[in-house]
Amino acid sequence: MLRSVKVFGFSLGELTEQERATLQAAITRNQDPTRGTPMVIIAPVGERPPSNDITPYPAAADGVIGVTGTTTDSLALQIRTTGQLIVPTGSFVDVAAPGENILTTTYDPNNSNPHTYSSVPPGAEYAAALVGGAAALIRSVDPTLGQDQVEAILRSTARDLGDAGRDDVYGAGLIDATAAVRATRHFLSVQPNTITLPSTIGANVTLTNSYTLAATWRIASAPGWVNIAPLSDNVSSSSTQITLSRLPSCDELNQDHTIEIESQMPLSYGAIEVPIQVADICQSVGPTPTPSQLTPVPTLTPAAGTPTPEPRSRLFLPLLERYCNSAGDCPEPR
């Protein structure tokens, strides 16, 4: 599954100095890698009356990706009749995303179909939700990334708007989710990481990649004595089934006993190998050790003054039988 993504977005508005300190401490604590998977925190810069200069929180806090909204023609959110911006600008703006003409779910009890979709008024909170989705995609490709790394990818792949380079209106520019995912190194991790099949034709095991879907990885090579099912995915993971198609010989196990998996992403941490064995066939799989690799058997030297025991001999005695005479006497054999 796409686990440990932990992307969190929220908006508070203006805070007192004490509230800001409490908020900052909570953000720092949730991004501490020693406490588990760091959380990626995203916040809209909000909307404001043209005369209001309130600094938005948590967008302005350290360790938070501040998001501004744009119109359908990639301009900062504004009053259409006057061109006056309705979003604050400043160093807290990190990236931009669409915030106008957003279609979302609504509920209208007076409608024959109360559950429907409709366009909502412009707002940076919708832009922040889109950035949260892009961040979740980045973390699904590599869940080990922290806040700063996710933000760096979003910034570096954004399409520049406004003044050249970073500016206080659009930040690094309009996010590009596709470019961001393609710029993220693929984290490969399959379970189990070693396979032992019983020596029964048809025995199988499922290899599962719990971080990414089937389109992002493939089986590069596998032993000829197993069948590999086509990769499949669902909403939470991707997997393939490894089935024993015939019993391999000892030599085959020694020569080829790994399944190689590689990423199909443009960037990758490289291929990984999963060892596979068959129970009761050549219990120790691997190359035959050379004499120099064998552990020598230690030679025991008798302690000083201890007599060396004489070698023992086996005595083979003839079979002795007892015979009884007609009187019933059974003399002992000589």
Image (cartoon, rainbow, N blue to C red):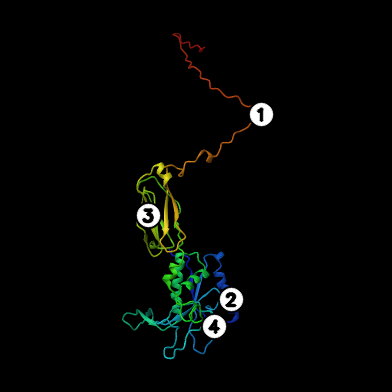
Residue carrying label 2: 22
Q: Secondary structure at mark 1?
A: loop
Residue 181 in the image: above or below residue 58: above
Cα–Cα gap, marks 4 and 1: 91 Å
Residue carrying label 4: 55
Which of the 4 quarters of the picture holds residue 207? bottom left
Residue 160 in the image: above or below residue 302: below
Q: Position of residue 247 (x, y in %)?
A: 37, 44
Q: Position of residue 221 (x, y in %)?
A: 39, 53
Residue sitting farthest toward the right: 305
Residue 291 in the image: above or below residue 333: below
Cα–Cα gap, marks 4 and 3: 54 Å
Cα–Cα gap, marks 2 and 1: 79 Å
Estimate how packed mark 2 is, as few (under 14), some (14 to 19) or many (20 or more) residues with alpha carbons within 10 Å: few
In contact (CB < 8 Å): disc 2 and disc 3: no
Estimate how packed mark 3 is, as few (under 14), some (14 to 19) or many (20 or more) residues with alpha carbons within 10 Å: some
Q: Secondary structure at mark 3?
A: strand
Q: Secondary structure at mark 4?
A: loop
Cα–Cα gap, marks 4 and 2: 17 Å
Cα–Cα gap, marks 2 and 3: 50 Å
Estimate how packed mark 1 is, as few (under 14), some (14 to 19) or many (20 or more) residues with alpha carbons within 10 Å: few
Q: Is residue 309 left or right of residue 205?
A: right
Residue 55 in the image: above or below residue 326: below
Cα–Cα gap, marks 1 and 3: 64 Å
Estimate how packed mark 4 is, as few (under 14), some (14 to 19) or many (20 or more) residues with alpha carbons within 10 Å: some
- For the residue pair 131 and 269, the one nearer the viewer reads as 269
Label whose residue precedes the other's in the sequence (2 or 3): 2
Label whose residue precedes the other's in the sequence (4 or 1): 4
Nearer to us of marks 2 and 3 is 3
Residue type of the residue flagged with mark 4: Thr
Q: Is residue 13 left or right of residue 209?
A: right
